[in-house]
């Protein structure tokens, strides 16, 4: 069961991190250059259909994997244990992603125009960096890079 969940976790990671890298490295520069809000909105609305389910799968599968590795929830924020340190990093990354996403959804996207495109870029870039960090912290469970 663990390996099946891990497979879906990795599949979700390719969509979440991959989609954000495409957005930040290819779509965003074009949108900022041409001030093409409509192009960005089209990408966002098609990506959202697969990106949001992928994030939900990441969270559910990630919580399952963490619980299997560390069934004692009181240990999840115990920074002296390497596994719990990585679980904490994942949860901190998740909280940062949520804060940025909520701010973008409530404050920037409803009034998206040529004038506030740069503000949106200041959200897309950190969310992309966070998505890469999610993958980096993820493989550290096996490689021990962050132990
Ligand atoms: C978009 C969010 C996320 C991405 C992109 C992501 C990505 C990854 C990747 C690439 C791995 C490496 C798998 C391997 O080495 O085989 C991994 C492992 C892991 N992730 Fe995530 N992850 C995300 C969210 C979460 C969340 C929210 C949690 C829960 C706290 C979590 C918990 C874990 C655990 C426990 C592992 C270790 C599995 C193992 O190596 O056996 N992840 N993640």
Image (cartoon, grey):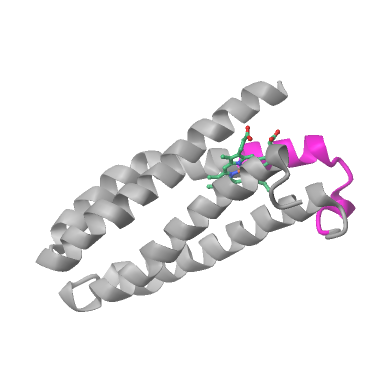
Q: Is 126 left or right of 8, judged from the image as shown?
A: left
Above or below: residue 9 compared with residue 17: above
Q: Residue at the location (69% across, 39% down)?
A: 143
Q: Residue furthest left?
A: 34
Residue situated in front as seen by the camera: 29 or 39: 29
Compared across the picture, whether 98 is left or right of 5 comes to left
Taking the spot 88% from the left edge, 58% from the top edge, the residue there is 80
* Residue at horizontal 36 percent and vertical 45 percent from the top: 19
x, y percent for residue 106: 40, 70
Q: Residue furthest bottom?
A: 115
Is 70 colored magenta in this rendering? yes
* Region rendered in magenta: 60-77
- Magenta region, main secondary structure: helix
Q: Is residue 41 magenta?
A: no
Q: From what the image shows, is residue 48 above or below residue 30?
A: above
The N terminus appears in which quarter of the rendering?
Answer: top right
Residue depicted at 32% across the width and 69% down the height: 120
Q: How many labels, in total?
A: 0
**Quadrant holding ligand 1?**
top right
31 lies left or right of 147: left
Image location of residue 117, percent across then percent down: 24, 71
Placement of 133 over or under 111, stated as above or below = above
Q: Which corner quadrant of the image does residue 123 belong to?
A: bottom left
Q: Position of residue 101 (x, y in %)?
A: 45, 63
Figure quadrant of residue 63: top right
Q: Viewer-proximal residue, 71 or 106?
A: 71
* Residue 81, percent from left and from top: 86, 52
């Amino acid at each position: 069961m663990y390996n099946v969940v891990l497979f879906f976790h990795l599949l979700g990671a390719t969509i979440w991190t991959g989609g954000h890298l495409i957005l930040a490295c290819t779509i965003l520069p074009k949108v900022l250059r041409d001030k093409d809000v409509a192009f960005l909105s089209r990408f966002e609305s098609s990506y959202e259909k697969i990106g949001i389910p992928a994030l939900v799968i990441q969270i559910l599968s990630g919580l399952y994997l963490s619980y299997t590795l560390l069934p004692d929830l009181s240990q999840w924020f115990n920074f002296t244990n390497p596994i719990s340190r990585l679980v904490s990093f994942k949860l901190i990354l998740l909280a940062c992603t949520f804060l940025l996403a909520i701010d973008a959804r409530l404050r920037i996207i409803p009034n998206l125009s040529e004038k506030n495109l740069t503000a949106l870029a200041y959200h897309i870039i950190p969310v992309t960096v966070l998505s890469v960090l999610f993958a980096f912290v993820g493989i550290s469970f096996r490689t021990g890079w962050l132990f």
